[in-house]
Amino acid sequence: MEKVTFAALLLLQIICTTYVAAAVAKSSSSHGGALKAACRKTPYANFCMTLLQPYATVLKGNDPYTFGHAAISASLEHAEGAQSFITQEEKDENLTADQRAALHGCLENVGYSVEALRQAKAEFEKSREAVNEKTRENHVNKSTNRLTVSSNDQSACYDSLNGAGGEMVRKVRENVDGAAKAGYVAKSLIQHMMMN
């Protein structure tokens, strides 16, 4: 009797595990399909997939608000990450005067970029609650304009790094580049999903 019970329990566990795995795979596949379709319409499709993958479970079909919110949130996280990285690098005692000045200028511009992204997120959230189409479009346009401002601020960071060399500058550029790409993806998704 004990062998039969153990075998039945083992069989039941295998069936349950298979059922749960199939349900998870189906859920991931449906979210992944919408994500992949949306990201294909951006200038950095593979980067977009990586950027929004943590949000895949909340992305609903082609809901532009969910995608837009996720994209702006991810962009803001990238920019804040770049800001933290630069702040940490600026404390390095081995920096030359040129490197320190370059980092300071870059950090200031990335700070402006972060603020512009926060404003973009706030405007985008207002668009969801808009009472009419004209108001909604106004908030979406303000949001995409703030995304453009954020990108310009990140470009200004790049400009401030010109002339300062070294491994640290390369790493800062990588961080800022990731934030800039995230902003381009957000703007592209919003424009495609909400304005077309």
Image (spheres, grey):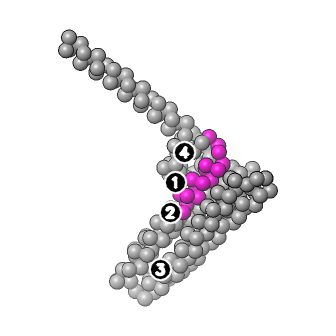
Residue identifier under label 4 = 58
The Cα atoms of the two marked residues, 3 and 4, are separated by 37 Å
Residue 139 forms part of the magenta stretch: no
| Pointer 2 or 1: first along the chain | 1
Between the residue at mark 3 and the residue at mark 1, the CA separation in whole angstroms equals 26 Å
Q: Which residues are magenta?
A: 61-78
Q: Is label 2 or label 3 in front? A: 2
Q: Which residue is mark 3?
A: 103
Judge the density around disc 3: few (<14), some (14-19), many (≥20) Cα neighbours within 10 Å: many
Relative image position of residue 74 (x, y in whole percent): 53, 57
Q: Amino acid at mark 1?
A: Leu
Dot 2 falls on a residue whose secondary structure is helix
Q: Kindly indicate whether the residue at mark 4 contacts the one at mark 3 (C-beta within 8 angstroms).
A: no
Which residue extends farthest top?
1
Q: Is residue 174 visible?
A: no
| Three-letter residue code for mark 4 | Val
The quadrant of the picture occupied by the N terminus is: top left
Q: Which mark is residue 78?
A: 2
Which residue corresponds to the image point at 46% horizontal and 34% vertical from the top-left?
A: 24
Q: Are marks 2 and 1 in contact (CB under 8 Å)?
A: yes
Which residue is found at the position 37% from the left and 28% from the top? 17
Q: CA distance from mark 2 to mark 4?
A: 19 Å
Label 1: element kind: helix
Q: Which residue is mark 1?
A: 51
- Lower position in the chain sequence, tag 1 or tag 4: 1
Task: Assess disc 2: are there few (<14), some (14-19) or many (≥20) residues with their C-alpha within 10 Å of its C-alpha.
Answer: many
Query: Residue pushed farthest bottom?
Result: 97
SS under mark 3: helix
For the point 61% across and 50% down, which residue is it? 67
